[in-house]
Image (cartoon, grey):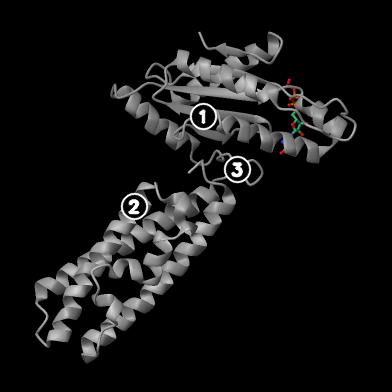
Amino acid sequence: MDSFTNQQLQLIITQLDQAIQNHDCWYKNLLRVLVAHLSPEETDLMPDAHRRCLFGQWYDSSQAEFIKEHPAFISLGTSHEKMHHSARVLLQRITENTPIAVSDWDQFSNHLESMRFAFQTLRHEFADAVQNRDPLTEAQTRTNLLTNLSQQQALVERGRQSCALVMLDLDHFKHINDEYGHAAGDEVLVSTVQCIKSALRPYDQIYRYGGEEFIICMPDTTVEQARQAAERMRSAVEAQCFQFAGSDAGLNVTASFGVSALSSSFSVEETMDRADQAMYKAKSAGRNRVVVDD
Ligand SMILES: Nc1nc2c(ncn2[C@@H]2O[C@H](COP(=O)(O)OP(=O)(O)OP(=O)(O)O)[C@@H](O)[C@H]2O)c(=O)[nH]1
């Protein structure tokens, strides 16, 4: 979800709502045809009926391109296709003027239910992502931080994977606000989060922990790998160059990083504390550096 912008998330929610509404209309019409033995829509009898309905057209369109790889979206497509195939079986009975078998109706109902469940799951996931996002930086808020970290710790405890936390804080950020204004400070925050996200893997998660402090959860990552990643982030942040009124030569910002392993030896809260302490050691040692918790 972190790879989607808020605008993309909002757009997909609107499109999903529209798709749900369209499907309800399609379903009402299907019932009408089945109950009153009317002639079915020709497109509903075609083997690729799932591509011809309004939802199918949207699903295959470039509008939905950016969520094509999302597992819940793929599962929605599968259940939608199955639902159309079983609806076609029912409609064929109407055209042949033969009774509908209860098993065929049950199969259709089950596929319809799975499809509606997939719709709701996807919508909920996207709405949840929007709700738990910091509107300025689009990093996640702290709402699900402890729950998500506890889940990661459970995987670590079962020996499934390693996991590392990286705490980072912009250096002398107050000076940027004081010297160039709050809007300039905001721009630095937004750009820095973008810059850090582009250095992360899709399943790493970045949370806004405080004003200019962020915490990154890196699943399947050892402390050494996290240190190297933090080092890459540190130099990417430092390479940014901002142009604000009064900063003719361009303004560079830096950040200090603390790295700690999420293990069974310490609680999630203690691990965050240790990453925080490592980050403060980086500040005390001169800032713009990465310190690993020892
Ligand atoms: N523009 C902007 N500033 C923010 C936001 N949230 C917090 N801040 C500012 O971030 C600054 C943090 O300052 P300090 O805690 O003194 O830290 P610092 O200046 O970065 O100094 P060090 O951390 O010691 O390097 C304060 O001036 C806050 O007002 C925000 O959303 N936007």
Q: What is the crowding at mark 3: few (fewer than 14 residues within 10 Å), some, or many (at least 20)?
A: many
Circle number at residue 138: 3
Image check: 90 left or right of 74? left
Where 215 sits versus 91, above or below? above
Q: Residue furthest right?
A: 246
For ligand 1, the image quadrant comes to top right
Residue tagged by mark 1?
200
**Which of marks 2 and 3 precedes in the sequence?**
2
Residue at point 42%, 72% (across, down): 21
Circle number at residue 218: none
Residue tagged by mark 2?
74
Q: CA distance from mark 3 to mark 1?
A: 15 Å
Query: Where is residue 148 drawn, in percent x and y?
Result: 43, 35
Q: Does residue 274 appear in the picture of this structure?
A: no
Q: CA distance from mark 3 to mark 2?
A: 25 Å
Query: Where is residue 283 drawn, in percent x and y?
Result: 68, 14
